Amino acid sequence: MRRSRISAEPFAIEVDFARAVFLVIDMQRDFLEPGGFGAALGNDVSLLRRAVGPCGAMLAGARAAGLPVIHTREGHRPDLADAPPAKPLRGPPEKRIGAKGPMGRILVRGEPGHDIIPELAPIPGEPVIDKPGKGAFFQTDLDLMLRNHGIETLLVAGVTTEVCVHTTVREANDRGYRCVVLGDACASYFPEFHAVGLRMIAAQGGIFGWVSTTDAVLAALAADGPATKAAKEHAL
Ligand code: C5J
């Protein structure tokens, strides 16, 4: 097994890329485009765009290197049977989960707003995990897929930093995975929450994981070369 060093906070981490995946959290139209769930909650969705370029660069690098990619989407069944009753009851009725918006019913599977933004669309062979909650492990088969493929490290990006990225990293950390969060490939409607969210991950000796950058991860991946290609045999 070959380990590559990624510079990160609180300290550099050695990663076996043959046992790593790139996990892209909820880069959906409902969060990033006007008229979706994020906008219905009163947020400036343009603040999330800053993560798109870095996410795209990491996607391209992962695909070129043979590093498996997994996407997630937050959303619910059309009858909302998988939404806890308190979730769709928040906010004014015309802006709630399940209400009709310019991109279809808000945060409902199968609607245009639920799709991943076209710039970061999954390609054939990349699993998409549909999750009813904020965390990607809650009521999904993500853990099973990762364990079946011997994955130990998650390279994590997406939105929003302090909600679905954080929840997923906490869930993963408790399940024994090592999470390296690509800070510049994450974003929040609240820049201060983004900054503090990243600090919380790396604080106390890396209480939830590591925080790095897209460039640092790509540099380690490029230096790794052949070892990553071995991951192709473990394609998810
Ligand atoms: C939110 C998410 N913010 N993907 N979801 O409701 O972070």
Image: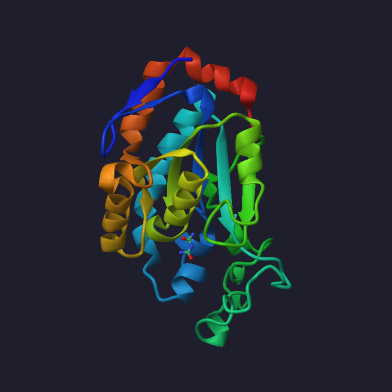
Q: Quadrant of residue 71?
A: top right
| Residue at the spot 72% in from the left edge and 71% down from the top edge | 81
> Observer-nearest residue: 220 or 124?
220
- On the image, the x and y values in percent for residue 12 come to 29, 30
Quadrant holding the C terminus: top right
> Observer-nearest residue: 57 or 164?
164
| Residue at the spot 37% in from the left edge and 17% down from the top edge | 223
In this picture, residue 11 sits left or right of residue 50: left
> Observer-nearest residue: 233 or 138?
138
| Residue at the spot 65% in from the left edge and 56% down from the top edge | 139
Give the total number of marks visible in the rendering. 0
Give above or below for 141 relative to 180: below
- On the image, the x and y values in percent for residue 49 come to 38, 54
Give above or below for 184 relative to 37: above
| Residue at the spot 57% in from the left edge and 82% down from the top edge | 89
- Can residue 35 be seen here? no
In this picture, residue 182 sits left or right of residue 118: left
- Can residue 24 be seen here? yes
Q: Quadrant of residue 98?
A: bottom right
- On the image, the x and y values in percent for residue 145 come to 65, 38
Colouring mode (rainbow / by chain / secondary structure / one colour): rainbow
